[in-house]
Image (cartoon, rainbow, N blue to C red):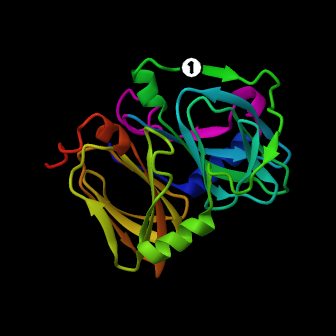
Amino acid sequence: MPAVWRYADARAALDQACNFVSPEQAERRNLILVNPIEDNIYPTCRHLVGAYQLVLPGETARSHRHSPNALRLVLDAGSETFTIVNGVKVDVAEGDVVLTPSWHWHGHSNFGDEPAFWLDFLDVPLVQNLESMFFENHPERDESVASHEPDSPLRHKGVDLVAGMRERGTVEIAPEGLKTIGLHAIGLTQGQSHGSERRIDNNIYVVTAGEVRINVENLGALTLERGDVVVVPCWHEYNIEGCSSWSQLVRVTDEPVMKALGFVNVMQS
């Protein structure tokens, strides 16, 4: 079902979790966005899961790899926050989208003096249903840095996405970067709308700047601020309208799966 999660609530919960959950205990300090449908214990929608993550100053979330594809949308991070992907140190900053494709080693470190918050999105539910789930911890716990690439092709800088949105409105992020997950950055002026009739794909939206008003079938109208998340499962009409002079969103979707399987023509209600 459609559902909304608030960044302010997530930050408060993660701050409290620091008292009793360490990266060593939980692999990642995540607050999972579990869809409130009855009997669900994990997915955000049928094929995707999202989670807010917190890495405190001085912490390292150990390196591992898994068959699911993953990405990080950075909400707040100070200097010296980075991800290591297959031995490459990738710096991250507010608004960045960083990809960790299937079976790539990845770990996260915060050597700065501010807590780092971001959103993780993975295709774990899809991979689990396909019975293709594999996971491995790095033998050294924390993968060593072999090179430093601030402009890694796996990093899509927030400043570049903003420039693209200002110019074109919607920017497709890393086409084919993740075979099962589609990504778009969307810019809206005040009163401008983005939406759709019923679709066969599942969509998750994150507000990354400004304020928007979303009206979703079976959920109603709600105002969302920076860091808030809404999931619009398949076959729900929705409309998102900019409420600020300039608002930004990131769309995370399983549309590439539907295209690969030839279902894109089954998108009319």
Q: Is residue 20 magenta?
A: yes
Left or right, 207 with respect to 216, comes to right
- Mark 1: few/some/many CA within 10 Å (<14, 14-19, 20+): few
Q: Which residue is mark 1?
A: 134
Q: Is residue 185 above or below residue 147?
A: below
Coordinates of residue 2 in the picture (x, y in percent): 34, 47
- For the point 35% across and 37% down, the residue is 257
Our reading of the magenta stretch's main secondary structure is loop
Tell me where residue 40 sits by quadrant: top left
Disc 1 marks a residue whose amino acid type is Phe
| Residue 41 visible to the viewer | no
Question: What span is in magenta?
Answer: 19-46
Query: In terms of depth relative to the viewer, which is nearer, 76 or 173?
Result: 173
Left or right, 265 with respect to 232, comes to left
Q: Residue furthest top?
A: 131
- For the point 57% across and 37% down, the residue is 101
- For the point 61% across and 21% down, the residue is 135
Left or right, 214 with respect to 64, comes to left
Coordinates of residue 240 in the picture (x, y in percent): 34, 65
Q: Is residue 90 above or below residue 258?
A: below
| Secondary structure beneath label 1 | loop
Numbered marks: total: 1
Q: Is residue 73 magenta?
A: no
Tell me where residue 156 sits by quadrant: bottom right
Q: Is residue 195 above or below residue 253?
A: below
- For the point 72% across and 57% down, the residue is 77
Coordinates of residue 6 in the picture (x, y in percent): 52, 55
